[in-house]
Amino acid sequence: MARAAKPRHLSRAPITEALIDIRVTLPKETRTLEHLAALYAQFGELYQDKKDIKEFQYRVQFDRHDLDEKTATQLGFRYTNAESTQVIQTTMSGFTFSRLPPYEDWERLKEEAKRTWAIYSNHVRPETITRVAVRYINRLVLPGPLVELDQYLRYVAKVPKVLPQVLGAYFSRIVVPDRQGQRTAIITQSSPPNPAEVSPILDVDVFMERLFSDENEVWDAIDSLREFKNQIFFDCITEKTAKLFA
Protein backbone atom coordinates (compact mmCIF):
# COMPACT_ATOMS: atom_id res chain seq x y z
CA MET A 1 0.00 0.00 0.00
CA ALA A 2 1.28 3.47 -0.90
CA ARG A 3 2.10 5.82 1.93
CA ALA A 4 -0.45 8.35 3.14
CA ALA A 5 -0.11 11.93 1.96
CA LYS A 6 1.53 14.43 4.25
CA PRO A 7 -1.13 16.75 5.78
CA ARG A 8 -0.83 20.30 4.45
CA HIS A 9 -2.76 23.14 2.85
CA LEU A 10 -3.88 22.33 -0.70
CA SER A 11 -4.18 25.51 -2.76
CA ARG A 12 -6.46 23.77 -5.29
CA ALA A 13 -8.39 21.59 -2.87
CA PRO A 14 -10.86 19.27 -4.70
CA ILE A 15 -13.79 20.25 -2.46
CA THR A 16 -17.25 20.29 -4.02
CA GLU A 17 -19.06 20.99 -0.75
CA ALA A 18 -17.95 21.74 2.81
CA LEU A 19 -20.51 22.02 5.57
CA ILE A 20 -21.03 22.56 9.27
CA ASP A 21 -24.16 21.04 10.80
CA ILE A 22 -25.67 21.66 14.25
CA ARG A 23 -28.66 19.65 15.54
CA VAL A 24 -30.95 21.08 18.21
CA THR A 25 -34.19 20.66 20.09
CA LEU A 26 -36.45 23.71 20.04
CA PRO A 27 -39.02 24.96 22.54
CA LYS A 28 -42.63 24.57 21.54
CA GLU A 29 -43.15 28.28 20.88
CA THR A 30 -40.45 28.46 18.18
CA ARG A 31 -40.91 24.97 16.74
CA THR A 32 -43.15 26.12 13.88
CA LEU A 33 -42.68 26.81 10.18
CA GLU A 34 -44.17 30.26 10.61
CA HIS A 35 -41.51 31.17 13.14
CA LEU A 36 -38.72 29.75 10.95
CA ALA A 37 -40.03 31.63 7.91
CA ALA A 38 -39.48 34.93 9.70
CA LEU A 39 -35.72 34.38 9.43
CA TYR A 40 -35.88 35.61 5.84
CA ALA A 41 -36.07 39.16 7.15
CA GLN A 42 -32.57 38.66 8.63
CA PHE A 43 -31.03 36.40 5.96
CA GLY A 44 -32.65 37.99 2.92
CA GLU A 45 -30.14 40.75 2.27
CA LEU A 46 -27.30 38.34 1.45
CA TYR A 47 -29.30 35.13 0.92
CA GLN A 48 -32.24 36.20 -1.20
CA ASP A 49 -33.03 32.86 -2.86
CA LYS A 50 -35.38 31.11 -0.43
CA LYS A 51 -36.82 27.65 -1.07
CA ASP A 52 -38.77 25.13 0.98
CA ILE A 53 -37.10 22.00 2.34
CA LYS A 54 -39.50 19.08 1.98
CA GLU A 55 -39.45 15.40 2.83
CA PHE A 56 -41.36 13.13 0.46
CA GLN A 57 -42.84 9.78 1.38
CA TYR A 58 -44.33 7.21 -0.99
CA ARG A 59 -46.79 4.48 -0.10
CA VAL A 60 -47.22 1.88 -2.84
CA GLN A 61 -50.00 -0.74 -3.08
CA PHE A 62 -48.63 -3.30 -5.51
CA ASP A 63 -52.03 -4.81 -6.23
CA ARG A 64 -53.94 -1.48 -6.25
CA HIS A 65 -51.93 1.30 -7.87
CA ASP A 66 -54.96 3.57 -7.68
CA LEU A 67 -54.35 3.62 -3.91
CA ASP A 68 -50.70 4.72 -4.17
CA GLU A 69 -50.00 7.75 -2.02
CA LYS A 70 -47.38 10.48 -2.12
CA THR A 71 -47.09 12.88 0.79
CA ALA A 72 -44.80 15.83 1.37
CA THR A 73 -43.85 17.32 4.72
CA GLN A 74 -42.17 20.69 4.89
CA LEU A 75 -39.20 20.67 7.26
CA GLY A 76 -37.85 24.19 6.88
CA PHE A 77 -36.18 26.59 4.47
CA ARG A 78 -33.05 26.80 2.32
CA TYR A 79 -31.35 30.14 1.60
CA THR A 80 -28.74 30.64 -1.16
CA ASN A 81 -26.60 33.68 -1.83
CA ALA A 82 -26.52 35.50 -5.18
CA GLU A 83 -23.30 33.77 -6.27
CA SER A 84 -24.68 30.30 -5.41
CA THR A 85 -21.57 29.63 -3.34
CA GLN A 86 -23.11 29.58 0.16
CA VAL A 87 -26.23 27.86 1.44
CA ILE A 88 -28.06 28.01 4.77
CA GLN A 89 -30.60 25.34 5.77
CA THR A 90 -32.87 26.04 8.72
CA THR A 91 -35.25 23.42 10.07
CA MET A 92 -37.02 22.63 13.31
CA SER A 93 -34.25 20.13 14.08
CA GLY A 94 -31.20 22.20 13.26
CA PHE A 95 -29.00 24.43 11.14
CA THR A 96 -26.60 23.67 8.29
CA PHE A 97 -24.17 25.98 6.53
CA SER A 98 -22.56 24.87 3.24
CA ARG A 99 -19.80 26.31 1.10
CA LEU A 100 -19.81 25.34 -2.59
CA PRO A 101 -17.06 25.94 -5.19
CA PRO A 102 -14.91 27.88 -5.27
CA TYR A 103 -13.86 26.82 -1.77
CA GLU A 104 -11.91 29.49 0.12
CA ASP A 105 -10.63 28.30 3.50
CA TRP A 106 -11.75 26.97 6.87
CA GLU A 107 -11.51 30.34 8.62
CA ARG A 108 -13.98 32.03 6.27
CA LEU A 109 -16.27 29.01 6.21
CA LYS A 110 -16.40 28.91 10.01
CA GLU A 111 -16.76 32.70 10.33
CA GLU A 112 -19.86 32.84 8.12
CA ALA A 113 -21.30 29.68 9.64
CA LYS A 114 -20.86 31.17 13.10
CA ARG A 115 -22.43 34.49 12.07
CA THR A 116 -25.49 32.90 10.46
CA TRP A 117 -25.85 30.30 13.24
CA ALA A 118 -26.07 33.18 15.74
CA ILE A 119 -28.99 34.64 13.76
CA TYR A 120 -30.75 31.26 13.72
CA SER A 121 -29.99 30.54 17.40
CA ASN A 122 -31.12 33.95 18.64
CA HIS A 123 -34.35 33.57 16.69
CA VAL A 124 -35.34 30.02 17.66
CA ARG A 125 -33.66 29.86 21.12
CA PRO A 126 -32.67 26.14 21.21
CA GLU A 127 -33.28 24.25 24.42
CA THR A 128 -30.40 21.86 23.73
CA ILE A 129 -27.67 21.24 21.16
CA THR A 130 -27.36 17.51 20.61
CA ARG A 131 -25.10 16.92 17.61
CA VAL A 132 -22.42 18.76 15.61
CA ALA A 133 -20.83 17.65 12.36
CA VAL A 134 -18.25 18.65 9.78
CA ARG A 135 -18.47 17.15 6.31
CA TYR A 136 -16.31 17.59 3.22
CA ILE A 137 -17.19 16.11 -0.18
CA ASN A 138 -14.23 15.90 -2.56
CA ARG A 139 -14.16 15.14 -6.28
CA LEU A 140 -10.70 13.88 -7.18
CA VAL A 141 -10.16 14.57 -10.87
CA LEU A 142 -7.33 12.20 -11.81
CA PRO A 143 -5.23 12.13 -14.99
CA GLY A 144 -6.93 9.66 -17.34
CA PRO A 145 -8.22 7.97 -19.30
CA LEU A 146 -6.90 4.89 -17.46
CA VAL A 147 -5.46 4.97 -13.94
CA GLU A 148 -4.56 2.52 -11.22
CA LEU A 149 -6.75 3.78 -8.40
CA ASP A 150 -4.50 2.39 -5.69
CA GLN A 151 -1.82 4.83 -6.84
CA TYR A 152 -4.12 7.67 -5.75
CA LEU A 153 -6.41 6.18 -3.07
CA ARG A 154 -5.14 3.99 -0.24
CA TYR A 155 -8.40 2.12 0.40
CA VAL A 156 -10.10 1.01 -2.81
CA ALA A 157 -12.49 -1.76 -3.73
CA LYS A 158 -10.80 -4.99 -4.82
CA VAL A 159 -12.00 -7.09 -7.75
CA PRO A 160 -12.02 -10.86 -7.12
CA LYS A 161 -9.07 -12.52 -8.90
CA VAL A 162 -11.35 -14.83 -10.92
CA LEU A 163 -12.82 -11.80 -12.69
CA PRO A 164 -11.28 -9.42 -15.23
CA GLN A 165 -9.27 -6.88 -13.26
CA VAL A 166 -11.32 -3.91 -14.44
CA LEU A 167 -13.38 -1.80 -12.02
CA GLY A 168 -16.39 -0.35 -13.84
CA ALA A 169 -18.09 1.28 -10.84
CA TYR A 170 -17.93 1.05 -7.07
CA PHE A 171 -19.44 2.35 -3.84
CA SER A 172 -17.92 1.96 -0.38
CA ARG A 173 -19.21 3.30 2.95
CA ILE A 174 -17.72 2.63 6.37
CA VAL A 175 -18.82 3.93 9.77
CA VAL A 176 -16.13 4.06 12.44
CA PRO A 177 -16.92 5.03 16.06
CA ASP A 178 -14.00 6.61 17.93
CA ARG A 179 -15.15 6.07 21.50
CA GLN A 180 -12.09 7.70 23.04
CA GLY A 181 -12.76 10.95 21.19
CA GLN A 182 -16.56 10.59 21.47
CA ARG A 183 -16.91 11.01 17.72
CA THR A 184 -17.84 9.02 14.64
CA ALA A 185 -16.51 9.05 11.09
CA ILE A 186 -18.46 8.09 7.99
CA ILE A 187 -16.17 7.63 4.98
CA THR A 188 -17.74 7.14 1.58
CA GLN A 189 -15.96 6.49 -1.70
CA SER A 190 -17.70 6.08 -5.04
CA SER A 191 -17.10 6.18 -8.75
CA PRO A 192 -18.04 9.38 -10.61
CA PRO A 193 -21.57 9.83 -11.95
CA ASN A 194 -20.05 10.26 -15.44
CA PRO A 195 -18.27 6.99 -16.34
CA ALA A 196 -16.21 8.81 -18.96
CA GLU A 197 -14.37 10.73 -16.21
CA VAL A 198 -11.77 9.48 -13.77
CA SER A 199 -12.92 11.49 -10.77
CA PRO A 200 -13.79 9.39 -7.71
CA ILE A 201 -15.75 10.97 -4.87
CA LEU A 202 -14.26 10.96 -1.38
CA ASP A 203 -16.81 12.04 1.24
CA VAL A 204 -15.65 12.43 4.85
CA ASP A 205 -18.39 13.11 7.42
CA VAL A 206 -17.41 13.35 11.12
CA PHE A 207 -19.72 14.12 14.03
CA MET A 208 -20.21 14.17 17.80
CA GLU A 209 -23.49 13.33 19.52
CA ARG A 210 -23.98 14.50 23.10
CA LEU A 211 -25.53 17.32 25.08
CA PHE A 212 -23.35 20.40 24.67
CA SER A 213 -23.22 22.73 27.65
CA ASP A 214 -22.71 26.00 25.75
CA GLU A 215 -21.80 27.43 22.35
CA ASN A 216 -18.09 27.70 23.19
CA GLU A 217 -18.08 23.93 23.62
CA VAL A 218 -19.93 23.57 20.31
CA TRP A 219 -17.38 25.56 18.31
CA ASP A 220 -14.44 23.91 20.05
CA ALA A 221 -15.94 20.56 19.05
CA ILE A 222 -16.39 21.74 15.46
CA ASP A 223 -12.71 22.79 15.31
CA SER A 224 -11.63 19.40 16.63
CA LEU A 225 -13.87 17.63 14.09
CA ARG A 226 -12.25 19.58 11.29
CA GLU A 227 -8.81 18.37 12.45
CA PHE A 228 -10.16 14.80 12.65
CA LYS A 229 -11.56 15.14 9.13
CA ASN A 230 -8.17 16.30 7.83
CA GLN A 231 -6.43 13.31 9.40
CA ILE A 232 -8.85 10.96 7.65
CA PHE A 233 -8.66 12.73 4.29
CA PHE A 234 -4.87 12.68 4.06
CA ASP A 235 -4.75 9.07 5.25
CA CYS A 236 -7.15 8.11 2.45
CA ILE A 237 -5.09 9.65 -0.36
CA THR A 238 -1.50 9.17 -1.51
CA GLU A 239 1.22 11.76 -1.94
CA LYS A 240 0.71 11.46 -5.69
CA THR A 241 -2.89 12.65 -5.25
CA ALA A 242 -1.97 15.49 -2.91
CA LYS A 243 0.52 16.85 -5.47
CA LEU A 244 -2.29 17.16 -8.02
CA PHE A 245 -4.05 19.73 -5.80
CA ALA A 246 -1.10 21.40 -4.05
Image: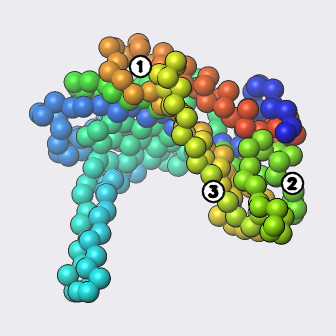
Query: Residue 219: x, y in percent?
Result: 45, 19
* Label 1 – label 2 distance at C-alpha: 41 Å
- In this rendering, the label closer to the viewer, 1 or 2: 2
User: As shown in the figure, which amino acid type bears the numbered disc 2?
Assistant: Glu
Q: Position of residue 15 (x, y in %)?
A: 66, 42
Label 3 sits on what residue type? Answer: Phe
Which residue is disc 2 drawn over?
148
The answer for how far apart the CA atoms under marks 2 and 3 are is 17 Å
Residue tagged 3: 171
Decide: marks 3, 1 in contact (CB < 8 A)? no
Residue labelled with disc 1: 218
Q: Residues within 10 Å of mark 2 (few under 14, many from 20)?
A: few
Of callouts 1 and 2, which one flags the residue occurring earlier in the amino acid sequence?
A: 2
Q: In the image, is residue 145 above or below residue 115?
A: below
**Observer-nearest of 209 and 19:** 209
Q: Which mark is residue 20?
A: none
